[in-house]
Image (cartoon, rainbow, N blue to C red):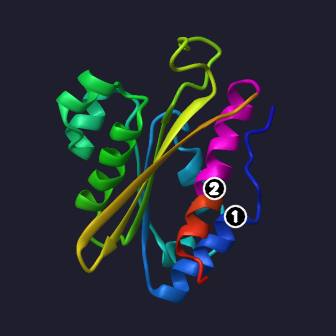
Amino acid sequence: MSVSVSPDYAPQLGQLLIDRGWMFACAESCTGGLLSAAMTDTPGSSQWFDRGFVTYSNAAKVEQLLVNVDTLERFGAVSEETAMEMAAGVLAAAGLSQLAISTTGIAGPDGGTPGKPVGMVCFGFAQRASQGVVTRAMTRIFEGDRAQIRRAAVDFALSTAIGLIEPR
């Protein structure tokens, strides 16, 4: 099964980033590089894509993104708290970037629990602003198999980022 994402979101986000003179970076857990791939599949992405981290393990989240060990212990890797720290950590590591997205979730087919079912993905969005870094998080539950969940997560992350920075 193909894991391609919607062909329109990455170029649309890229154009918005170019229009603002912004760079983009991301941190991925459950999407395992698909978000970075969607961005770099877009011609000209070197104008606005800075870097991507795949931090699948908790140790990688702590070492590369400065996620607090206490956050992981209290809320778990799949949580809005961790997603926000991941996104903020990307901006700390990627000094050129103004926008960052993180993904952390349970793509399945195993690993779900009653409180955190298969298909649950937490997203972190971080943006540089005059008052510092502003973060927000969202959680969604996607249906389907592992590939479908991961693809849906990338589509949601990109479309949400477009909505966050597109002129109103």
Residue found at x 69% / y 33%: 142
The magenta region covers 144-158
What residue would you read off at disc 2?
A: 38
Percent coordinates x, y for residue 35 in the rendering: 57, 50
Three-letter amino acid code at the position of disc 1? Tyr
Q: Nearer the viewer, residue 94 or 142?
A: 142
Looking at the image, is 21 positioned above or below residue 41? below
On the image, which quarter does residue 62 sit in? Answer: top left
Q: CA distance from mark 1 to mark 2?
A: 9 Å
Q: Nearer the viewer, residue 33 or 102?
A: 102
Percent coordinates x, y for residue 139 in the rendering: 54, 40
Quarter of the image with the C terminus is bottom right
Residue found at x 60% / y 59%: 160
What residue would you read off at disc 1?
A: 9
Name the mark on residue 76: none
Looking at the image, is 45 positioned above or below residue 108? below
**Is disc 1 surrounded by few (<14), some (14 to 19) or many (20+) residues within 10 Å?**
many
Helix, strand or loop status at disc 1 = helix
Q: Is residue 137 left or right of residue 94?
A: right
Three-letter amino acid code at the position of disc 2? Ala
**Is disc 2 surrounded by few (<14), some (14 to 19) or many (20+) residues within 10 Å?**
many
Quarter of the image with the N terminus is top right
Q: Are marks 1 and 2 in contact (CB under 8 Å)?
A: yes
